[in-house]
Image (cartoon, rainbow, N blue to C red):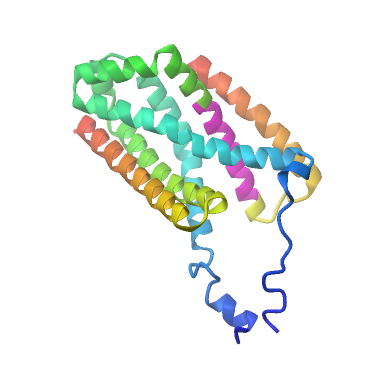
Amino acid sequence: MAFLTDRKRAAGTGSAKSGTEHHWHMIVTSCALAILVPLFVFTFGSALGGTYEETIAYYSRPWPAIIAALTVLVGMIHYRAGVQTLIEDYVHGDLGKVLIIGAICLSYLLAAAGLFAIVRLAL
Amino acid sequence: MADVNRGNRPLSPHMTIYRPQWTSMTSILTRITGNALIVGSILIIWWFIAAATGPEAYARANGVITSWFGDIVMFLSVWALWYHMAFGIRHLIWDSGHMLDVERSETYAQAAIIVATLLTIFTAVVL
């Protein structure tokens, strides 16, 4: 029997000890993506399939490059939080932890790779 | 008495005895589309890396993404993207305390599938 009151447990921000922070980050990133995704779909879509020279010229322009960089970065932050919830729901114990670490590292890798490529194209 | 119900809380309904509804099916599809989008993301980031590497690498990546296989992945990804966005916005509406009744949730679910499909067709036609 734990001698904790409900009030005290709520103040301790729950069993995860981070309160609603995860959910709040999902709200913030999804609001950002609701604006970024349509912009990215139509800028990236018009570049896809073009020649090498066309693509280089297109992503040397500021806004296509900025939209792509933001979409990759915010998208991967959003994915990191989303995939963590997915794994937490279905896989438990050590395997769950390993999968969460692996998936989070994948999202960091994709964010870094995407940003590096976009910066190199743009400059 | 803070710990009266510890370990004896109600459990989620088991999928095999649970009648599929618009709300539950669209909810699970939101999760599936969101996580499946990693495939399209990897392809697109590979395309950017290839473009930053040089003409031969770009030709290879661009060829794969615009092949019939790449077209299928991209078309499904676009649908998944619009669908996930439509239902992500539903979560934002729910979080603000609106549209929580069953009837309007089901109407939104059906409308969002139609909107996502129309947006996908629009995207495929325009691009």
Q: Decide if residue B65 is on the left or right side of residue A53.
A: right
Residue A62 image offset from top left, x and y in percent: 28, 33
Residue ranking furthest to the bottom: A3
Which is nearer the eye, A25 or B4? B4
On whether residue B88 falls in the magenta region, the answer is: yes
Q: Decide if residue B31 is on the left or right side of residue A100.
A: right
**Magenta: predominant secondary structure element?**
helix
Which is nearer the eye, B105 or B64? B64
Please give the range of residues in magenta. B77-93
Q: Residue at x 53, y 72 (%)?
A: A13
The quarter of the displayed image where residue A79 is located:
top left
Asked if A97 appears above or below B51 in the picture, the reply is below
Q: How many marks?
A: 0
Residue B89 image offset from top left, x and y in percent: 60, 43
Q: Quadrant of the image for the C terminus of chain A? A: top left
Q: Decide if residue A112 is on the left or right side of residue A88.
A: left
Residue B18 image offset from top left, x and y in percent: 77, 44
Q: Quadrant of the image for the N terminus of chain A? A: bottom right
Q: Residue at x 50, y 39 (%)?
A: B35
Residue A92 image offset from top left, x and y in percent: 52, 55
On whether residue A93 falls in the magenta region, the answer is: no
Q: Residue at x 33, y 32 (%)?
A: B45
